[in-house]
Image (cartoon, grey):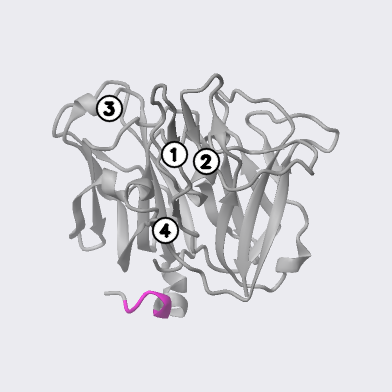
Amino acid sequence: MDQGNNIECLKTFRVNIPLNSTTGGKLANGIKYYFPELPIFKGKNIVGIDLNASSFSTSPGSYIVNGDLEDKTQVGTLINMEEARNIYLTIYSEDGQEKHSNLPLRSLFMVASAIGGFFPYETYTAGKRVVKPLYGKINPRKSYAFLPVGTFAVKDLKYISLNFYYN
Amino acid sequence: MKPILRSYLAEVNLGTTTPGNGQNINIQDYPQLREVYITGVEVFDSGELSISPSGKAVVTQLKGLTLTLMDKFNMEMIYQYPCFDLNPTNVGGFYRDFKPFFLQLTKSYISVLDATTVAANQSVMLNIFYITAKDFEKYKNLYGPGK
């Protein structure tokens, strides 16, 4: 890790946010996907959030962007580093105000952003992990992930993994 | 890095024609960003965002752009700061945090210093970290005294 920071906190909690409808509908554009009920954060002060994402590579592949987590235990697949470029989070405070509006999901996991490169593979590693020091009490039930209308190649059952640091 | 109490993703669209060298593009009014103290900012290009929330293409590079932020006294508190250096990807994952000042967003602007690096209808994405003026007294100790 060539750079990074440390968040002083009492506890951490990783949350999976499914990006599908209650009827099993797959990921689609222009739709808000609300966070699940997370009573564990009630009255707790969040001090940081980071994204856990899987690696992305083209096939046959000219570049690879390394993530930090692979998980086959859930329904659907974990968002990868490339897909994260298409998703925004809006997070509400505990008193119901919009706290973080359209927070880019990808900004919660910074790595070299260059997209491209030619064979042999260019690899972008997860070398610049910085926990975003988002601060305050949140209302997860009002918060949501949003995919703008536009191109998004993967229409599938997907989920986001966020790691919350809190006291 | 200081704590981020609130953030708002502002979109600065370059317009329907490619801007010229030296052109300034004012940031539009966002009601959420009136009466606020700015505490930090980050800027993104298409490496981090494939499309803006409003469906616009995002600039592919930031090297020809700078950001100027004005305070309520029309002082240029941040003057022509290279946007490239405001992208956390390019500075070890960190964002630039400021000693909080009362932001006047509608007089703040992006300067295009090299128009060959951008195209018409692309957007520059600014994620602005702030505290509302009414909350400033409550939270100012997190940031040190404002002006």
Q: Reading the chain from its start, which is encountered first: label 1 or label 2?
A: 2
Q: Chain of mark 3?
A: B
How far separated are the C-alphas under marks 1 and 4?
Answer: 28 Å
* Left or right of A18 in this view: B20: left
Circle 1: is it few (<14), some (14-19), or many (20+) Cα within 10 Å? some
Circle 4: is it few (<14), some (14-19), or many (20+) Cα within 10 Å? many
Q: Reading the chain from its start, which is encountered first: label 3 or label 4?
A: 3
Where's the C terminus of chain B, which quadrant?
bottom left
- For mark 2, what is the residue? A66
How far separated are the C-alphas under marks 3 and 4?
Answer: 25 Å
Q: Are marks 2 and 3 in contact (CB under 8 Å)?
A: no
Q: Is residue B19 visible?
A: no
How far separated are the C-alphas under marks 1 and 2?
Answer: 6 Å
Q: Is residue A58 above or below residue B143?
A: above
Q: Which mark is residue B118?
A: 3
Q: Which mark is residue A124?
A: 1
Residue type pointed to by label 1: Tyr
Write down the quadrant of residue A22 in the picture.
top right
Residues at marks 1 and 3 on the same chain: no
Residue type pointed to by label 3: Val
Most extreme residue toward the left, as rendered?
B22
Q: Nearer the viewer, mark 1 or mark 4?
A: 1
